[in-house]
Image (cartoon, rainbow, N blue to C red):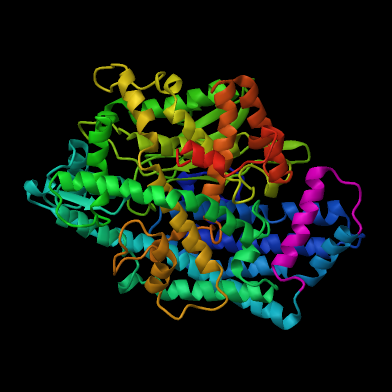
Amino acid sequence: MNELNHNTILAASDAAFGAPRFDLFREEDYLPAFRAAIATAKAEVDAIVDDPREADFRNTVLALEYAGRDLSRVEALFFNLLEAESDPRMQEIAEEISPELTEYGLYVSLNDRLFERVKQVYDHPSELDTASRRLLEDTYRSFIRNGAALGEEDRKLFSELSSRLSVLELRFGNNVLSATNAFILHIEDEAELEGLPDYLREAAAQEAASRNLEGWVFTLQFPSYSPFLKYSARRELREKMWRAYNSRALGGEYDNRPVILEIVQLRMRIASLLGYPDYASYALERRMAGNRTEVEHFLDRLMEPALPKARQELSYVLEYAHANGFEDPVLMPWDFPYWAERYRLAEFDFDERLLKPYFRLEDCVKAVFSLAGRLYGLDFVRRDDIPVYHKDVKVYQVLDENGEHLALFYADFFPRQGKRGGAWMTAFREQYSEGGVDCRPFISIVTNFTKPTESSPSLLTHGELTTLMHEFGHALHGMLSKGVYPSQCGTSVARDFVELPSQIMENWAFEEEFLDTFARHHITGEKIPHEYISSIVRARNYLSAYYHVRQLHFALLDMAWHSLDRLPEQGVEDFEHSVLGEYATLPLVEGSCISTSFNHIFAGGYSAGYYSYKWAEVLEADAFDLFSERGVFNPEVADSFRKNILERGSSEDERLLYRNFRGHDPEPEALLRKLEII
């Protein structure tokens, strides 16, 4: 590698389309690049403040919108790699630079002279188009929400609280990652693999070999953990895995309990400083729901009819387990996945493992590309000449219906050390337009699908196919963006609106007309049998009320933490159990805790926002009804969804965007009907 400095990260890329030169980046370049970019961003802000002209939309609001582009680029590169290709040094860099980034944010948001210019424009607005007027309102409101109207002492306190909070949020995520990686289940006796399918055994043997161990190694990464609980016939091993997963960062070296309490306290103090009764009220102000009362009412409407049915579903699983040798009076959480899978096999006379040979990853990827072509006219062309940050990553050029360049799409599918669990979409560069030039995005999806082995390709479960399509829906939202202002483009929308494009895509995973186009046995080439597809569709709502209620548990826990006006007297685990107790379906287990590894709300931007997954499910259930009515590949419906939802970002109020597509506001009952709860 050439001797380089931070200018490699900051400089314009010579790769195709200006793609990041991941092949030239070094860890030691990030801190200098961050600091140079912060200095440039401050100079750009100073130029706005020192402008002798009277403040107007162009020289103040628009100039501020485009200030700090170098910093945005470095942040997008570094923090995305921190999630997907991290190591202890990257985590150290994140903690070191976090206070400096927070300080820059406060340099903008608590800048009296800058706020005064923005306020002048806000108080005396010129004629503006809808997107520009929304940008002005959002910019002004952002200053208010970030303390600009506070007195001098309170602004100083706000700054201190925000800086500390940013460090703690990073620490929380790092603790979860470290705790996840710290546990392995090492098996040397083959008899203890009873019940496990061949693909999982082979992956575990490969994991053991990578660690220079004999036998089989199972980890807390989801492709290992989840099927182990579903298929292992050894109850004591299931319990060991479940307890390890559900006690991550609960005590020990990576204890997140004190981190949670300090994060919650800091958020309470910030909300109070800004005049809100609690953090939830502060967070919800700029979302579709609007306020805490609306969210609580929404969750109640979803929970009330679902909880009795969820408990009834569990009783059926327990009854089946008792009839087949299970002797305990109740199912414990480590029993439920195993017996639920066995009951599903008996109820539907179908083994989900039979599907995996028909869902080769490469075929599934081609299928979602083809679906995007059929719906939106897109074409995906593999580009091996564009640098990547890991050898597993693949890059595609995305072309629109006219063959014009639309985006770069990065796909990173397999788990590894230093990559957090789960699946997500992100961007190394968002779409925006400046001076009439349309800057096209670099979009990425990251997953943790089972890696191919020497004897088998990467084969997906149907659930993993659904995950792929979910994240690809987010990617389409980014790739098809046609906005002007960066803060309004792509997925930069209200938190409770952002999941609509992703969740609606999941529906095609249950459409025979789509599955029939690509699902072939990876060895024989045999088309997936019709009866398999029928079983997928019939089993779609198997235990739907239980899983629905489980998601509501997460939303309720999130709202409980962020509706506090003082810290709870009991500890983290006891507080969690007190919140969820009346809604429990399975027994609450001492020594387990959701909160200590709940990245979404303590490190991932979903604080007081986890309900938005269910909110978006309501949106997509209602929206997909239109596809179902007129044809799942109907070009007019797809074009309307593209133009009213996918292209518009947040250039207009999201409620209006939805009405423009659907013609009415959605109702929670649309989801309850889809799940067959009512």
Q: What is the x, y in percent for residue 643? A: 68, 31
Left or right of residue 419: residue 106: right
Most foreground residue, 469 or 28: 469
| Residue in the image at 56% along x and 75% along y | 266
| Residue in the image at 27% along x and 35% along y | 452
**Magenta segment includes 140:** yes
Numbered range of the magenta stretch: 124-149
Q: What is the x, y in percent for residue 673? A: 50, 38
Q: Main secondary structure of the magenta part?
A: helix
Most foreground residue, 64 or 144: 144
Left or right of residue 167: residue 10: right
Where residue 365 sits, quadrant-wise, is: top left
Most foreground residue, 641 or 431: 641
Left or right of residue 124: residue 549: left
Left or right of residue 256: residue 19: right
Q: What is the x, y in percent for residue 217? A: 19, 51
Question: Count the marks: how many?
Answer: 0
Task: Note whether residue 100 is visible.
Answer: yes
Q: What is the x, y in percent for residue 647? A: 66, 35
| Residue in the image at 73% along x and 46% along y | 653
Q: Where 323 sits versus 166, above or below?
A: above
Q: Where 15 sits versus 151, above or below?
A: above
